[in-house]
Image: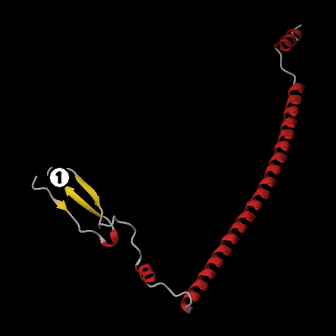
Amino acid sequence: MSKPSQQNSTPGVNGISVIHTQAHASGLQQVPQLVPAGPGGGGKAAAPSKQSKKSSPMDRNSDEYRQRRERNNMAVKKSRLKSKQKAQDTLQRVNQLKEENERLEAKIKLLTKELSVLKDLFLEHAHNLADNVQPISTESTATDSSGSGQ
């Protein structure tokens, strides 16, 4: 083939690693390689909004700070109440399903007993029918035909 092709990129934005691809002279294999973007080692980059907040710390006595804390506290309280309600609902549903399961198991036991009784009655009836039916034997047929010929 012709000369080997190489793709090199400049380091990415916000410390994101860049993939460099090299094609060998044979053209059969391309090997991507991860290269760190910057000298810092490529840690997580902070969001732009977070950077501006950290650069100028809020005054704890300001009204804006108090409003943010109050809203945050309300949000946390709401989240905790929601989580607690969800846990209570789940527990109630579990108890409801346990009761239903117990009822169904009792019904299974009852139906199993009923089936056993009916099965025994059926087998007893079938046995009685078998005892009442006269089996046709070859002896009685032979004596009947020879006795009628006399």
Residue at far bottom of view: 63
- Taking depth in this image into account, of 131 and 44 the one nearest to the observer is 44
Quadrant in the rendering for residue 144 = top right
- Quadrant for the C terminus in the image: top right
Q: How many marks?
A: 1
Query: What amino acid is labelled 1 in the image?
Result: His
Quick one: label 1, few (<14), some, or many (20+) residues within 10 Å?
Answer: some
For residue 90, side relative to residue 135 (left or right): left
Above or below residue 108? Residue 93 is below
Residue 88: give x, y in percent of width and height.
Answer: 72, 68
Q: Which residue is at 17% across, 52% downward? A: 24
Residue 75: give x, y in percent of width and height.
Answer: 61, 80
Residue 23: give x, y in percent of width and height.
Answer: 19, 55
Q: Which residue is at 88% across, 33% downward? A: 125
Identify residue for label 1. 24
Q: Which residue is at 22% across, 51% downward? A: 29
For residue 27, side relative to residue 142 (left or right): left
- Taking depth in this image into account, of 69 and 110 the one nearest to the observer is 69
